[in-house]
Image (cartoon, rainbow, N blue to C red):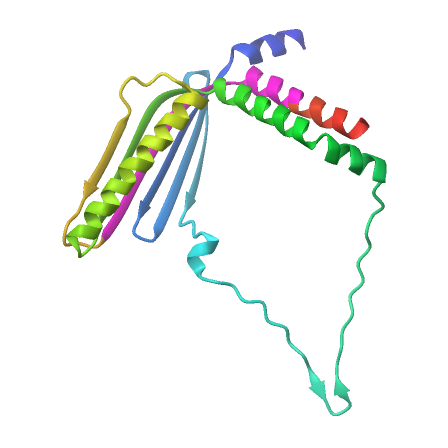
Amino acid sequence: MVIILLISFVLKIKVDFRYRRIQEEDHIDIDFRMFGGLWRANFQIPTVQLEWEKGPQLELEQVAKTKGGTRKTKAKARIRYIRRGWLSRLWLNLPNYIALFNSIKKQFYKGIHCKEFSWRVEIGYKDACHTALAAGSFWVMFGFAMSHLYRQVTMEVSNPTLEVVPQYNKECFFCDFRCIFHLRIGHIMIVGWTLLRTFLRGIRG
């Protein structure tokens, strides 16, 4: 058991995450590798459609009318008993729990070592002015994302590849994002145990 724990602290997982979007089609490719590529798992998620892209959702209620009148249906729900003392303690200590969670989150992010980073966007509209504004907006977003990333994770990339290519007089959108990072299994275990211990302490009060 001790040997397994020691190996877990040394063992690294290589994660290759890639997201591509061409017009309305998305594709996510996640590749996990260990032992220098001897163990490998790959997950592909094609054509991801976000909820907000489907348009507004309306909730309709159907009422059935018969000769005898309107048919009504009733549903019963059972609410589990919650101790007031636990709920009041949770509410009073909520700021402390949020601070602890943010601290654990920072600890987890610092264990992520980014080895490769690239982000390419091509965007275009029929109006050249709109294309220029969109390209400038993406550069601003790139700057904000990179500054946040350098503060959160351990960046070992000296020159990340960032490209915004405006396509004038042409309606198009293409996004290619790729990030390769290493993460130790032991680090995941420590952060997970810290999070579980904090949660159990909150429940017990």
Q: Position of residue 66 (x, y in %)?
A: 72, 88
Residue 84, picture quadrant = top right
- 172 up-or-down from 181: above or below: below
The answer to whether residue 163 is left or right of residue 32 is left
82 relative position to 173: left or right: right
Taking the spot 32% from the left edge, 19% from the top edge, the residue there is: 157
Name the quadrant containing residue 119: top left
Question: Which residue ends up furthest to the bottom in the rendered image?
Answer: 67
Q: Position of residue 100 (x, y in %)?
A: 63, 24
Left or right placement of residue 145 versus residue 193 in this view:
left
Q: Residue at x 72, y 29 (%)?
A: 93
Instruction: Name the foreground residue: 5 vs 173.
Output: 173
**In the displayed structure image, the side of residue 119 where residue 85 appears, left or right:** right
Q: Residue at x 61, y 17 (%)?
A: 190
- The quadrant the N terminus occupies is top right
Decide which of 111, 138 is in the foreground and name it. Answer: 138
Stretch of the chain drawn in magenta: 172-194
Counting from the top left corner in percent of width and height, residue 5 is at 62, 11
Quadrant housing residue 147:
top left
Instruction: Return the x and y of residue 141 as percentages of the image width and height.
Output: 33, 37
Q: Where the C terminus falls, by quadrant?
A: top right
Taking the magenta stretch, the answer to whether it contains residue 189 is yes
Relative vertical location of residue 22 with respect to residue 112 in this rendering, above or below: below
- Name the residue at 19% across, 40% down: 165
Residue 6 versus residue 143 in the image, above or below? above
